[in-house]
């Protein structure tokens, strides 16, 4: 199985998503379930990076957990999956720079 790296930015995004879901729903269990789904999808990506996600125009790949986009790179030579970003699917990735 490839090495899995989750960038600090992606971890921060996951944490912000979970906090927002709990605040919106008022139930901790909502955040726990979403967290489980996101990390379960990340584990599947690490296990089969070319089979789970689809190729993006920029060369990265993306997969979805509920309505959240998990953007990652797979380096076959280094046998490594790098989780770059986790954002709501309605948001544009990569974000426009100002």
Image: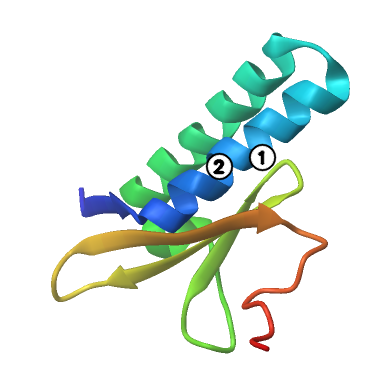
**Mark drawn on residue 5:** none
What residue sits 33% from the left and 46% below the top?
47
Instruction: Measuring from the top left, give residue 77's x and y in whole percent.
Output: 15, 76
Residue under circle 1? 17
Instruction: Measuring from the top left, give residue 40's x and y in whole percent.
Output: 48, 33
Image check: 92 left or right of 3? right
> Which quadrant: the C terminus?
bottom right
What residue sits 58% from the left and 80% below the top?
56
**Mark drawn on residue 14:** 2
Q: Nearer the viewer, residue 79 or 17?
A: 17
Q: Secondary structure at mark 2?
A: helix
Instruction: Measuring from the top left, give residue 48's x and y in whole percent.
Output: 37, 53
What residue sits 76% from the left and 47% below the top?
67
Instruction: Measuring from the top left, give residue 68's x and y in whole percent.
Output: 69, 49
On screen, residue 14 above or below 7: above
Q: Nearer the viewer, residue 52 or 87?
A: 87
Q: Nearer the viewer, residue 8 or 88?
A: 8
What residue sits 50% from the left and 71% below the top?
61
Image check: 35 left or right of 76? right
Tag 2–tag 1 contact (CB < 8 Å):
yes
The quadrant where residue 69 appears: bottom right
All told, the count of numbered labels is 2
- Neighbours of disc 1 within 10 Å: few (<14), some (14-19), many (20+): some
- Neighbours of disc 2 within 10 Å: few (<14), some (14-19), many (20+): many
């Amino acid at each position: 199985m490839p090495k899995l790296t989750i960038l600090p930015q992606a971890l921060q995004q996951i944490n912000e998503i979970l906090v927002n879901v709990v605040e919106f729903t008022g139930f901790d269990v909502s955040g726990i379930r979403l967290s489980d789904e996101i990390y379960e999808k990340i584990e599947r990506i690490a296990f089969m990076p070319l089979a789970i996600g689809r190729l993006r125009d920029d060369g990265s790949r993306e997969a979805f957990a509920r309505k959240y986009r998990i953007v990652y790179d797979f380096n076959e030579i280094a046998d490594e999956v790098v989780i770059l970003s986790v954002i709501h699917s309605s948001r544009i990735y990569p974000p426009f720079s100002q």
